[in-house]
Amino acid sequence: MLGFATGSTVELLTGVPTLQQLGLDTPNSDLFTVLCILLGTATAIGTGRTLYRLQSGDMALKDFKRYAGFFGLDAERVAEKESSQRKKSGDFTSRDSIAAITEAKEAGSPADALLMASDAAAGAVQEEAAPVEAPAAPRMTADEIERAYARDIELSQGRYAMLGFVALILGEAATGNGLVGQLEAYAKLFGLLGAESGF
């Protein structure tokens, strides 16, 4: 991001596009081809690794939620992934823990004793059993929520900025126009600049 800001600032002050600031002649079809191959290969490798982690189940739930948010997937798909992760971890709701449930039933509990006891014995068992409080669900503080929101926004905006920077560099390699030249060309293309626009 700092490189983009520096290159754009120098271009605005001097009129020299980013790649030309680095000593590369533009337009340059060979440079454009090399950049496309490098960026395409890096994108394919990253996408392949992500898809492999997703298919093999190695992707952490927080990563999956981040990707789901970035690509606009629905909450049902996220809930399905979360359910799948819980089943893999072997919590008490998964099918894999039936042996643990059977073992707990055989060990007995104050509730089982209370339900199976006669009316006279029920009072005695009820006095012996200590009240059990359900564990409180962990809650995020307002500061933690704000930090998580800011992190997610920064990640999304950073990704979009990287895509924009790649498009700018590829456009400059293909046309020889830097940021200002490309914005001017798009403005003329859409009729915002030129004889028809009055500017």
Image (cartoon, rainbow, N blue to C red):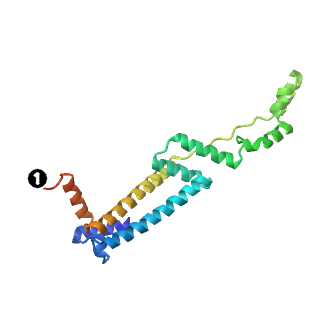
What residue sits 18% from the left and 52% below the top? 192
* 161 sits to left or right of 136: left
* Helix, strand or loop under label 1: loop
Name which quarter of the figure residue 32 lies in.
Answer: bottom left
Residue depicted at 75% across the width and 43% down the height: 97
Which sits in the foreground, 152 or 159?
Answer: 159
Number of marks present in the image shown: 1
Task: Classify residue 197 as left or right of residue 138.
Answer: left
User: Pointer 1: what residue?
Assistant: 198
Q: Is residue 122 above or below residue 190?
A: above
Is there any visible trace of residue 143 in the rendered image? no
Q: Please state, as top left, top right, bottom left or bottom right, where the C terminus lies in the image.
A: bottom left
x and y percent of residue 182 in the render?
25, 62
Residue furthest to the bottom: 23
Residue 54 in sight here: yes
**Whole-percent x and y of residue 190?**
21, 52
**Viewer-nearest residue: 63 or 13:** 63
At label 1, counting other C-alpha atoms closer than 10 Å, the crowd grade (few under 14, some 14-19, many 20 or more) is few
Q: Is residue 113 left or right of residue 194?
A: right
Task: State the residue at coordinates (41%, 67%).
Answer: 37
Residue at the top extreme of this rendering: 119
Position of residue 38 measured from the top left corner of the image (x, y, whole percent): 43, 68
Q: Which amino acid type corresponds to the residue marked 1 in the rendered image?
A: Gly
> Observer-nearest residue: 60 or 6?
60
- Is residue 97 shown above or below 24? above
Q: Residue at x 42, y 65 (%)?
A: 39
